Image: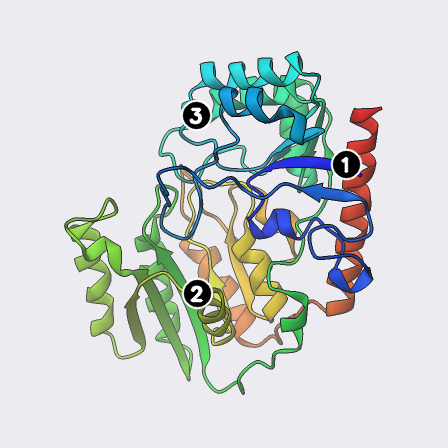
Amino acid sequence: MIRVASVPASHVYVRHLAPPSGTGGRPGAGTDSIIRLDDPIPEDGRKVPGGWWPPVMLDPAWIRDHHHLFDLFHVHFGFDAIAPRVMEDIVHELRSHRVPLVYTVHDLRNPHQPEPEQHRELLDVLIPAADSLITLTPGAAAVVANNWGRECTVLPHPHVIELENFERARPPATDFTVGVHVKSLRPNMDPFPVLDTLCATIATLPGARLVVNVHDEIFDPDNHWYAPQAANRLTEYARRRDVDVVVHPYFSDDELWTYLMSLSVSVLPYRFGTHSGWLEACYDLGTAVIAPSCGFYSEQQDCKVYGFDEHHFDAESLDRCVRELYSEEPVRLSTAMRTRQRRLSASAHREIYEKVLA
């Protein structure tokens, strides 16, 4: 039995690294003899919107006090606010107690931070220190090799929706519906050039609609994400006859799946980033994706790609992607394919853990 301290354990990506529960064992343990510790709950009960606990495990003192509870430390997400010096102390504590460190490079560029330097400083600590590195795409692995001289094992992103939900039927296709979910306008999002282009394209396609979803917190003066100018600009799109602007709180998982299945296409309005769980959920549910050329989204799934990054926006390519999907049948990944992929990923993780512990 290998005991793993995953940061965080509750994220859907991490939960789906275990074999499917139908293959034996309890969910989270499966048949691969891996036990992932639950996320410790902060003493003061702090919780960020969307349900993340702050990562209590990312604390040198916590590691010092609890290292006897786990055999291996695996970092995924949640270290945005950690100072490089603290990350160095975390690495030191792990080494002091001979606990191997595994790091999955999800983000080469943090989508929540407008500038790359802070995240790069943390990568400069984590990537050289890790006993083993994992990433999701060959492109990301090549960047790690070029920038840090380290080799990554490439393991595809697992399914996002639960396997039992794969049989959920999509609503009958009537209109061609393109969706842009701007959430709370995190720093890597720049929806306005995307929306302007989509409005022009949709207006020329019979039966087509554009749906813009936004979290209500950008309208709340007391909220961290309050953005009145952007909020007003977004609501202006609702004046168009073929555009709906929907303002709402964070979706529950079930609400999110229902929303995604109501779309023919989901357009990702990102100027920078690396990988996307949203994209994976769309393919689990049979919703096509138009992804930007930044990052490595197109290596995750066979999606349409338009030109968009920090230096340019190619309206013509976005228009072309929408028109191509207007006449194409959507692709939905199968339960069998995702189950097989998950089993292979669980086996690969077990082998990596056994190797670093040997």
Q: Mark 2 points at which residue?
A: 252
Task: Please tell me which residue is depicted at 43% across the width and 65% down the height of the picture.
Answer: 252
293, above or below 68, in the image: below
Mark 1 crowdedness (10 Å alpha carbons): few <14, some 14-19, many ≥20? some
Q: Can residue 335 be seen in this view?
A: yes
Q: x%, y% of residue 29? A: 74, 50
Q: Which colour scheme is used?
A: rainbow
**Looking at the figure, which quarter contains the C terminus?**
top right
Counting residues from the start of the chain, the first of labels 3 and 2 encountered is 3
Task: Please tell me which residue is depicted at 55% across the width and 52% down the height of the picture.
Answer: 277
57, above or below 224, in the image: above
Q: Which of marks 2 and 1 is in front?
A: 1
**Looking at the figure, which quarter contains the N terminus?**
top right
Mark 2 crowdedness (10 Å alpha carbons): few <14, some 14-19, many ≥20? few
351, above or below 243, in the image: above
The kind of residue tagged 1 is Ile
Question: Left or right of 92: which side holds 243?
Answer: left
- Could you give the CA–CA distance between mark 2 and mark 1, rounded to whole angstroms? 32 Å
Q: x%, y% of residue 351? A: 83, 37
79, above or below 318, in the image: above
Q: How many labels does the image show?
A: 3
Checking the image for residue 82, the label placed there is 3
- Could you give the CA–CA distance between mark 3 and mark 1, rounded to whole angstroms? 27 Å
Helix, strand or loop at disc 2?
loop
Q: x%, y% of residue 57? A: 53, 31
Q: Which of 73 and 104 is in front in this view?
A: 73
Q: Name the residue under label 1.
A: 2
Q: Which of 271 and 169 is in front in this view?
A: 169
Task: Please tell me which residue is depicted at 67% across the width and 71% down the height of the picture.
Answer: 164
